Amino acid sequence: MRQPRLSLREQPLPGGQPLAFGAGLLIALIVGTLLLLAAGHDPLKIYSRMFEASLGDPDAWAKTINRAVPLGLAGLAVAVAGSMGLWNIGAEGQIMAGAIAAAWVARIGGDWPGIILISMMLIAAIGGGGVLALGPALARAKLGVNEIITTLMLNEVAIRLVQWLIHGPWKDPDSFNFPLAPMLPDQARLPTLFSRTHFGLLIAVAVIVIASVAVRYTAWGYELRIAGSSEATARYSGISLSKKILTVLVLSGAIAGLAGGIELTGTADRLTETISNGFGFAGIIVAALALMRPSGVAVVALLFGAVQIGGQSIQTLGVSSSVSTILQAFVLFGAIGAGVLSRYRIVLDANTRSIKKEMSDD
Amino acid sequence: MTEASIIGLFVATVSFGALLYLAALGELLAEKAGVLNLGVEGMMAIGAVTAFIIGVELKNPWAALLVAMLSGALLASVHGVFTVGLGAEQVVSGLSLTILGLGLAAYLGKDYVGLPPGAELVPVEWGGLSDLPWIGPIFFNQAPIVYLALLMGIAVSLVLSSTRLGLALRAAGESASSTDSAGHSVLGLRLSAVAAGGALAGASGAYLTLSITPQWAEGLTAGRGWIAVALVIFGAWRPGRVGIGALIFGGTLALKTRLQPFGVEFSPIILSMLPYVLTLAILLIISVRARKRPSPAPFGLGLAYRREER
């Protein structure tokens, strides 16, 4: 009997990650076709609708871009931490913390002029996300507590914080006792660029560019990547690991918080439980597909945004929204698998037991 | 505050505790073998929906439980193939598994939303024991899955601590390369631990739709899978302590909907943060103590093993 084993390729397959993402899309397409056929739909009709709704005209592009903004920023947050080998699983909670902070500013600054109000809201959002990441950052930097679990737990705390605010202290007195936060003041809405694309696009692009340059071309980023590839090397070359961990995780939380602030002022009318809508978790996937490179998150986020918006659009054709969730999962697993296989090949090893048997047979 | 409402609170505490315990035991098995599986929420959802569907179609709760465990194991195996077989990132694969499980559950269950259950696991009568004051209703009049959870806890504990299989499993989680050198298949051990973990998460989901709720709706698992992940840490990777933790966390779930009769002016939402906050506190305590004694986490947790890279 022969056992399969993974062997590192001398060179990764050409095409690398884009190819892996393509393979993921292809697998999702095949699975999706089967699911749709099973449910009695015409796959071609559904797919063309998905394409039209996400990339077919300027309005569709606007929707896709508005979705790509939080996905890209959440992905960036994860990727910045990931460049140093840290896992920020808490972007979901940090997005909500950012939205809470921004909503709080909107509450106290209801009569401020728009530009000041929006700026203050976004700054507060950055702070909110950073504050939620501060705990895990300190715990990891000073005590070595695994950041995966601490950030994961804080997600659940943050969503309940939003629920509590909406059901309690921030409940709109005019909401007929529904658990709704009050509407944002009109001047607290981000201006739009074209169609319904909001100004968040420019902010997100700027932040992604700055972060990419900082990680790729500055001494700070170089130290970050060294610390990510080998702790021992970093320590030997005098890089203060605990300070790096602290700043990187807080920065990561701050970026996610900004995403929450932009989502609130850009697309939401008010603070809701679904303000993050899974963007934080999707951000982990976006970052992983971009191989933790800040420069890669924008493209992946755009593609992912298109898949999500396309998936929403087919609900009007009577296709369950779960089909789009399943498709996303298959894009992920397809891409994960293809990513591994572009770097490794499967070889068959002779099983040790069968070798022994052969030897004793001789 | 009546006696009945206090007893009701404890009954629900044990019942929610068992629900969490099953899923947490599954996660514990996988983690002991070195595989972090963040897909618990998805596996619970798949278990919940398949149990409900089989219940409606076959009217047999035991067949429903069995299918739920099998589908939980099957879904977990996806994570196993990717992380153990291919060595993919466990965090990314686990989160993808949650998305896949929730999506599949919603897809499979869309025609069953709001239907009455076809089969239920009714509380077990223990004769005279069930009639005892307090103890009777709390411990001796629960759904069979509660006793299954207890049995599983004892079984997992015994297997891990006193069998060769358990030793090999723990070794695979501590140091995969030495386990491999000792002639055990790390691949086989880890895959089976992950699949067994999925089966337990599936059983936990089945408990929701066969007894606790008992209906199917999207989002039924409501974040309880994450509590299971937290429980493993809270219980320091020990089946017994995880069981105690399950009762405590189960208590917070039970209290959530039962605060009013006690006349407590306290937001149930704030209370529902408690499991996570407690877990964070325990994590801090573990790590502060870790300076004096080693961390209880399996050493190889989260690390992929590829033979040629050892």
Image (cartoon, helix red, strand yellow):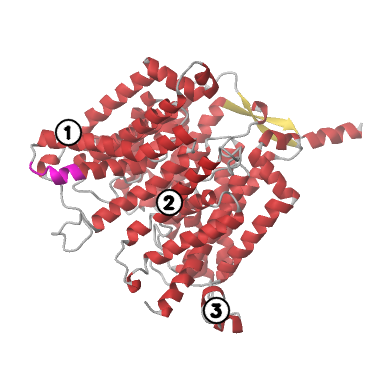
Q: Chain of mark 2?
A: B
Q: Is residue B31 left or right of residue A155?
A: right
Q: Is residue A352 left or right of residue A301?
A: right
Q: Which residues are magenta?
A: A104-111
Q: CA distance from mark 1 to mark 2?
A: 33 Å
Instruction: Name the amino acid, label 1.
Output: Ser
The C terminus of chain B: image quadrant? top right
Identify the residue at horizontal 46%, vertical 69% (top origin). B12
Q: Residue furthest front?
A: B292
> Is A43 a magenta residue?
no
Q: In the rendering, at what x and y percent does residue A206 appear? A: 26, 25
Front in this rendered view, residue B279 or B69? B279
Q: Relative to A42, is A120 above or below?
A: above
Q: CA distance from mark 1 to mark 3?
A: 61 Å
> Is A108 a magenta residue?
yes
Viewer can see residue A76 = yes
In the picture of the structure, the residue carrying the numbered disc 1 is A119
Q: In the rendering, at what x and y percent does residue A312 appear? A: 31, 47
Q: Chain of mark 1?
A: A
Q: Relative to A100, is B263 above or below?
A: below
In the picture of the structure, the residue carrying the numbered disc 3 is B136
Instruction: Name the amino acid, label 3.
Output: Gly
